[in-house]
Image (spheres, grey):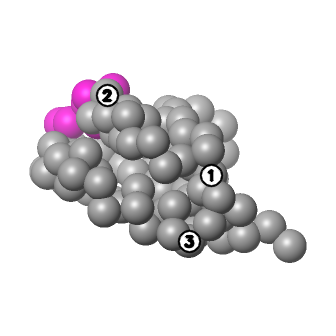
Amino acid sequence: MIRHVVFFSAKPGECPDVIRDGLMMLAQIPHARHFEVGRNLHADQINAEAPDLVVYAEFEDEAALAAYKADPIYEKCIQLVRPMREMRIAADFTAA
């Protein structure tokens, strides 16, 4: 199984809730075993540049992750969210 984690921060003046709503369109893509988008609670006061949002998804394998990224909804989401976000960091990993 592949775990897909993406961190986003909003540009100054942009509303994280609007970005979250845009990211939620990714839940319509059928290739993920599990998908969620959450607001960062900012409980770690040490990191002032912490992300505002986290996307977490699980995929059966690399083919399922590739199919998710190839879906037209994925591209629509990018076009909607990219202008509102300042930072995006993604990581994909497998559990040992």
Which three-letter amino acid code belongs to the residue tagged 1?
Glu
Of marks 3 and 2, which one's residue comes earlier in the chain? 2
Of 67 and 79, which appears nearest the observer?
67
Image position, residue 35 (x, y; %): 55, 40
Label drawn at residue 21: 2
Query: Which quarter of the figure is the C terminus placed in?
Result: bottom right
At label 1, counting other C-alpha atoms closer than 10 Å, the crowd grade (few under 14, some 14-19, many 20 or more) is many
Where does label 1 land, which residue? 58
Q: Nearer the viewer, residue 49 or 28?
A: 28
| Image point (54%, 36%), residue name | 36
Give residue 7's mark.
none
Q: Is residue 12 left or right of residue 2?
A: left
Is 64 on the left-hand or right-hand side of 3?
left
Q: Residue at x 42, y 35 (%)?
A: 27
Q: Over which residues does the magenta segment extend?
A: 13-20
Q: Amino acid at mark 3?
A: Glu
Q: Seen in the image, is 4 located left or right of residue 67?
A: right
Quarter of the figure with residue 49: bottom left
